[in-house]
Structure formats: C-alpha cells, structure tokens
Image: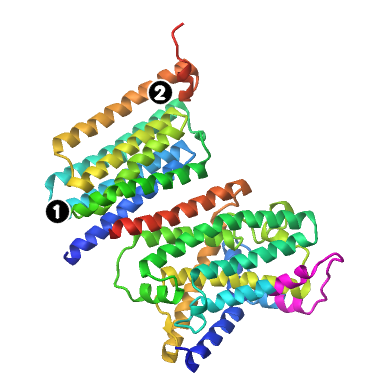
Amino acid sequence: MSSAASIAFQILQSVFVVLAAPLLMGWVNQCRAWLQNRSAPPLLLPYRALAKLFHKDAVIAHNASPIFRLAPYILFGCMWLAAGIVPVLATDLPFAPAADVIALVAVFALARVFSALAAMDIGTAFGGLGARREMLIGFLAEPAMLMVLFTAAFISGSTQLTTIVETLGHREFAIHPSLAFAAVAFLMVLLAENARIPIDNPATHLELTMIHEAMILEYSARHLALIEWAVAIKLFAYMTIGFALFVPWGIAEAGDWAALPLALAALLAKLALAGAGLALLESQLAKLRLFMAPEFLAAAFLLGVLGILIHFLVRA
Amino acid sequence: MSPTLSLAGQFVNLFAALLLLISFAMLAQRRILTLIHLLAWQGAALAASTLIVAATTGQGHLYFSAALTVLLKVVLIPWVLHRLIDELNVKWDVETLIAIPTTMLVGIGVAIFAFALATPISQMAGTLTRSTLGIALAGVLLSFLMMIVRRKAVAQVIGFLSMENGLFFAATGATYGMPLVVEMGIALDVLVATFIFGIFFFHIREQFDSLDVHHMEKLKED
C-alpha cells in the first residue's frame, strides 16, 4: 500500500496544496473585484503579501506568553496536516489511514482552539471578543459539519475520506436527495468556518464586526504570514473536501502517474468554478448580524440531519 | 425493479425530500409573503410527484388530482392569500412563540418521530412510493408544529393548508391516491376553508385590532 509511488504522491499533494492555496485566495479576490466593478488585484498578490510579511520584523507584546508565539506554527501545521488527509489529487494516500473524517474535524478544532487561546493571550478587548465569537461559530458549525460527513459516510459505508471518494466516484448514476441536502449544509458550514460573508467579512476594517480578523489583530510579520497562509490552506482544504464528497469525478488513483494530468486539470477546473461561485455568493449576500449566525448554522445542522434521515428512509 | 421504475422512484424520493425541506423552510420563515410563496412551491412539488406516480403506475385519476393540485394549491389559494394580506396589510414579520433555532430542533425531533413511526409500515408496503410515507407524516406533524408556534392567524392558516398538502402526499404515497370523489371533496373543502378563514381574519381584526390569536383567550361574555 505504502509503496514509493504513493508516498511520492502524498508528498507531491501536500506540497501542491500549500503552494496553490494562496492562488485560490487570489482568484476569489479577483472574481469578487470583477463582480463589484472594481479593478481586480493581481492574481499573485497573496504570494507577494506573504513574501513581504516574511521579510518584516515581528512585533510582539511584552506580556505575550509562548502560546502566542507558538499558535501560528500550530495553525499552519494543522492545516497542512488536513491538506495531507484530504484526497485532493489522488486517493489511496499512505497518510490517509492515519485520520478519518472525524479526526479531520478534530484537526480543524485544534487549530481553532489555539487561535482562540492566542487571541485571548494578549488581553486586548478585540482579541477576547474575536475569540468568543469564533468559538460561538465553531461550536455551532462543527456538529453541522459532522452531520454532512456522516451522510456521506453512511452512503459509502466508511468514514475514510479516500474510501468515500472511491465509492462515490465509481458508483452508477443515482439521485441521492440526502447528498443534495448535505451539499447545501456543507456550503453553509464552509462559509461560516472560513469567515466568509454571511457570517464574517474577510475584507472588513471595522473591528466591532470582525470575528476572525479581530483574533489576529495583534499578529505581525512572519506570524501573520503563517496565519494568513493557514487561512488560505483551510479554504482550499474545505473546497477539496466538498469536491471529494459531492463531485469526486476525475480524481486519480495513487501511483497512477498517467491519470495525474487529468486529475490536476479536473481539480483546477473545479477550483476555478468554486472560487468564482464563492465570489458570486459573497457579492450577492449581505453579512448577517452576529445573533443571526446561530440561526444560519442551525439551518445547516438541520439540513445535515435531514440528509442522514432521508438516506435511511429512502434506503429502507 | 426495472430501471425506469427505479428512476421514477428516485424522482419521487427527490420531490418528497423537497417537500420536507419546504416544510422546514416554512417553519423557519419570518415573512408572511415568503410563507405564501413556499406554500405554492410545496404545492408544485406535490403536483410533480403525483404526476410521476400517475405516469409510472398508470392510475388515470392521479392525473386529475395533479391538475387539481396545480390549479388550487399553486395558483388559486396563494392568489387568494396574496389578496388577503394585501387587504389586511399584514406583510410584517411573523412573531413566533419560541425562538426559530429551537423550533427547528423540535422539528428535527418531530421528523425523527414520524420516520420511526412510518418505517415499519413502509417495509410492509410494496408500492413505488413506500419510502415517502414517513416524509408525508413528517410534513403533517411539522405543519402542526407551525400552527402551534405561530401567533398570527394568517401563518396558522398557512400551516393548516400545508398540513393538507402533507395529508394529500400521504394518500398518494400509501395507496396511490384516494378516489377522485374524495379528492375533489377535500380540495373544495380546503378552498372553501380558505375563503372562510379570510372572512374570519377580517372579523378578528375588527374585534381586536390585531391578528394575534392570543387576544381570543380574553373572549368572554360580560
């Protein structure tokens, strides 16, 4: 199973995700600028911003504890790990048996806990405020996410993402109402978890409405760069989880070098479409009041549960 | 099962899922105007699934009932309700007794109850639509829930009409529809009920200056 070829695939995929993630961010920003009739920032701007931040000197508050310094690295590590688990280009990765979808959610939760701890560490008002809001969103989004993943797991009979992809990718065509429910729920969770518009505004400059941005106000230079990069990888990972669950076609088997160009082309096409779709959605929607966020996420949870229930009912 | 039959079955399941989704959307909806649109969409989903069942089973009278559904529940009743809320000027947000996320969680519980209740019945049935009985039952119970948690008379009536949709769907799902005479009777009943409710709305508002049915608890003879 863990032959040299599949290990090479694993390394290739992990590096590819980390390197390509800022590109996706740039693409989404560009699409959004076009839709809002602004002149678009260059596609490679996120890379330049990261390079600039890595060259600056970090400013850290006097009362910062080691958690504050450590959190960006943990965040980046968690996201990288997640990128290694999700089948992006190929299934049957040697890394994948280490963690199933439940562990994947736990990896995201670990990152969230550390970013919240780091935000509260300095003791500024905005940090604490952002951390609390983030935990509010997180504890509501997580069950919804798990329900979505369970729906796919029940259909394919496994909680391994790679097995799910193989089962769903090779089945004969059938309408799964449960998967449609799960897809809508997943989209809502994706928006909430990645601090996108109905819940949080990634481009906001108003501290009182911030959630994610409020948590990282104290960070600068390489720490900020790592966090921004981790955010980009998280969006990438979530999108590829979505592809794995709902549009798994075109993915390559591990070690199958011939299928790799096709898989890469399919992935790029899906990402381009999904990024444009995300930008369109963000331009269409208005940010919800924070107190409406539980309602939004309760709806996502509801859809996830309905997906599972309908799966059982229809199969019976 | 032949492939065409199973494809039809899949579509019936899809529309059933849509019906349930619309029931939940109605439960979560705050605006009366959107509630009426949702009711119309629910009727459309119902008609579509009835049509598919009619086409696959060859039950001629189901075509009539699908046509009746479109005419009454997609066109006529929503139109009457539109006129009513225009006359009454009640497009404002619906007040609920309990918070909407809580209502939705209760709704999940209700749906699980209905599914658990229907599963043994479905396993005995051999019809194309056997798996939709639980969804129909859930639709009925969710409409009940909606009537319970809403304060305003208009929203309660929409809940009532949605319950009728659920019952109709249950009839199609369990026995390929009721006899045409019964269906016609129920359809007319619902239509008449809508008109009578309309008259009631005006009376309630005239009496209490509001459509909040809680005022009716105070109704006593001096």
Answer left or right for B195 relative to B65: right
How many C-alpha atoms fall within 10 Å of the one at disc 2: few (<14), some, or many (≥20)? many
Does the image show residue A158? yes
Q: What residue sits right under mark 1 in the picture?
A: B57
Name the colour scheme. Answer: rainbow
* Image spot of residue A57 (x, y percent): 83, 76
Image point 29% across, 55% down: which residue? B13
Dot 2: element: helix
Provide the secondary structure element on which disc 1 rests.
Answer: helix
| Type of amino acid under label 1 | Thr
Vertical side of A260 occupied by A249: above or below: above
Q: Which residue in the protein does label 2 denote?
A: B201
Q: Residue at x 34, y 76 (%)?
A: A170
CB-based contact (under 8 Å), mark 2 and mark 1: no
Subunit bearing disc 2: B
Percent across and percent down for residue A68 are 76, 68
Q: Residues within 10 Å of mark 1 (few under 14, many from 20)?
A: some
A60 is within the stretch colored magenta: yes
Q: Amino acid at mark 2?
A: Phe
**What quarter of the picture does the C terminus of chain A occupy?**
bottom left
- Identify the chain of the residue marked 1, using the numbered disc in the image: B
What range of the chain is rendered magenta?
A50-73
Q: Quadrant of the N terminus of chain A?
A: bottom left
Q: Residue furthest bottom?
A: A4
Q: Position of residue A298 (x, y in %)?
A: 51, 50
